[in-house]
Image (tube, grey):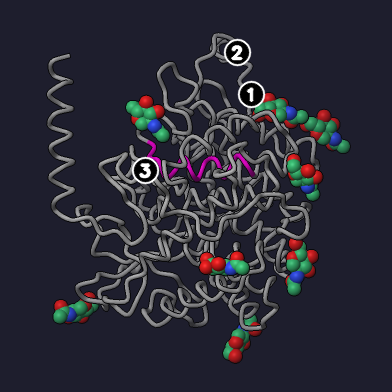
Amino acid sequence: MKLHPYIILASVVGMVQALHMDTNNLTNIKQNAALVADGLMNYYDGYRRGGTIGKFIPPYYWWEAGGAWGSLIDYSYYMENNTYHDVIQQAMEYQTGDDYNYIPLNESTTEGNDDQGFWGVAVIAAAEKNFTNPKDPKKQWLALAQAVFNTMSARWDPEHCGGGLRWQIFQWNSGYNYKNSVSNGCLFHIGARLARYTGNDSYADWSEKVWDWMIDSDLIIPGPYWKIVDGLEVDNCSDISPYQWTYNHGLFLAGCAYLYNYTEDEKWRNRTLELLKGAVVFFGTEYDIMYEAACQPSNTCNQDQRSFKAYFSRFLGLTMTLVPETEAVIRPWLVNAANAAANSCSGGTDGVTCGLNWFTGGWDGKFGLGEQMCALEAMTNLQANKFPIYTATTGGSSQGNPAGGYAVTNTNASPLKLGAGDTAGAGIITAIIGVSIVASGVWLVL
Ligand SMILES: *[C@@H]1O[C@H](CO)[C@@H](O)[C@H](O)[C@H]1NC(C)=O
Ligand SMILES: *[C@@H]1O[C@H](CO)[C@@H](O)[C@H](O)[C@H]1NC(C)=O
Ligand SMILES: *[C@@H]1O[C@H](CO)[C@@H](O)[C@H](O)[C@H]1NC(C)=O
Ligand SMILES: *[C@@H]1O[C@H](CO)[C@@H](O)[C@H](O)[C@H]1NC(C)=O
Ligand SMILES: *[C@@H]1O[C@H](CO)[C@@H](O)[C@H](O)[C@H]1NC(C)=O
Ligand SMILES: *[C@@H]1O[C@H](CO)[C@@H](O)[C@H](O)[C@H]1NC(C)=O
Ligand SMILES: *[C@@H]1O[C@H](CO)[C@@H](O)[C@H](O)[C@H]1NC(C)=O
Ligand SMILES: *[C@@H]1O[C@H](CO)[C@@H](O)[C@H](O)[C@H]1NC(C)=O
């Protein structure tokens, strides 16, 4: 919603633009995606005086920034446009945290496994797309992805409900007693991609372990249409929250596609195809257009949920690349999504602001970072299978560190050493409350 004087003038004189999508015309796709990407960047905090590199303006949480950089990597790679290259690289480099594992101190008191996971998904994509690595050898994309994987897998909790990751990393955060599909989905998905990229079977073994736990826990529910539900309570493992979200479905779908592509084991093909069939729940029957089924009809999607369709398109794009037989189903979904999203990108003062609900044929009055991301990924992923997904042996140049993520030096440097498997207790909570009381005191004085 940039209030550029020219745009205000344009709307006053009635020259309001809108996107005109032709999904058979690459020049046209690129032009439309550029307008949507530029709209996305209006929310970038790093462009503001005093803003933080790598973050988006409030109310967008840190995790969604990890999601957005992933969307912009897709934009750069599939649209062959390097305009945002340096901004993306700088952002992902700045937010790694002192231990190079995407637990930066500023976020560490609220960060969950899923938050860390979405930055992990962005860096493994950077490695696979041979996105220019930072100069710092400790911040190579592959090493960062391995660090995210190592610290997440070390939090595996066999004590409750037979395994799985909890939602939260820290005991004091509400949600610590919840084990959700997105946290486990991130571990499954990153493991699958690391296996294919590095050729190291240990990652695939971990993904299989996550999958088996999801099945045993009834979080993945086979049937005529396979479902992935939201999560379960640690206090009562049968107390399951039944909501289905596009991003969970996509994380597991694409993870299965990676595992099939890597192992060529028929069981992963079968799981890919079954999850693909189950994904119809996210396409409105009347229009066959992608939607967030659990919140869009009731108009209750929160800021986070408004970005989920972006990851879903991204994971559909990867799936049709890795398991080419799925393109027959996926491409029409993406074409419909791109067209419908483009129609929705006709709002705001600039005339190209994207909406949330793509069924209306126009703008629904909603706007935000998530809306821009969803439209962008629907468009850019039309090109997904025209480009290679590199591995360490087929063109990827990122250097790894299989032991990354913890055991980094300077353990005294920060009050919170929140590495692998830590479940920080009351002492640390007290320390943080102490620090924030001092901090707010200082603030009051100032
Ligand atoms: C493709 O799209 C571009 C940009 O919108 C347009 O200038 C061009 O005429 C289109 N080409 C065809 C063949 O429609
Ligand atoms: C490349 O990206 C920038 C930023 O989104 C955009 O302004 C420009 O038009 C794009 N170029 C092409 C050829 O699409
Ligand atoms: C952490 O927060 C401080 C204060 O807002 C900011 O200056 C710094 O850039 C932030 N660091 C990261 C990695 O976001
Ligand atoms: C394979 O991955 C595992 C799990 O991260 C790691 O412990 C092991 O060192 C890796 N092996 C090689 C040869 O890199
Ligand atoms: C556990 O949750 C299930 C499903 O909600 C419920 O039927 C059952 O009564 C609960 N068990 C206990 C001990 O609360
Ligand atoms: C997957 O495997 C099951 C059990 O073998 C079989 O019934 C089903 O038809 C398979 N699905 C696909 C899509 O191949
Ligand atoms: C793996 O993915 C590549 C594209 O990246 C594709 O060409 C190849 O056929 C896939 N392999 C299998 C077994 O599906
Ligand atoms: C990957 O990037 C490296 C470093 O920029 C470059 O040398 C290499 O040619 C690239 N690989 C491919 C396949 O483009």
Measured from the top left, where is residue 66 in percent x and y? 48, 44
Residue in the image at 32% along x and 51% along y: 418
- Asked whether the viewer can see residue 22, the reply is no
* Relative to 407, residue 63 above or below: above
Looking at the rendered structure, the secondary structure element under dot 2 is helix
Q: Is mark 2 within 8 Å of ligand 2?
A: no
- Asked whether the viewer can see residue 12, the reply is yes
Q: Nearer the viewer, mark 3 or mark 1?
A: 3
Span colored in magenta: 60-73
Q: Label 3 amino acid?
A: Asn
Quarter of image, res 19:
top right
- Along the horizontal axis of the image, is 1 left or right of 407? right
72 falls in the magenta region: yes
Identify residue for label 3: 410
Residue neighbourhood size for the residue with mark 1, other residues' Cα within 10 Å, grouped as few (<14), some (14–19), many (≥20)? some
- Along the horizontal axis of the image, is 154 left or right of 362? left
Identify residue for label 1: 17
Answer yes or no: do the residues labelled 1 and 2 have beta carbons within 8 Å?
yes
Looking at the rendered structure, the secondary structure element under dot 1 is loop
Identify residue for label 2: 10
Query: Is 354 or 240 nearer to us in this picture?
Result: 240
Q: Quadrant of the C terminus?
A: top left
The span from disc 3 to disc 1 (Cα, nearest Å) is 54 Å
Q: Label 2 amino acid?
A: Ala
237 falls in the magenta region: no
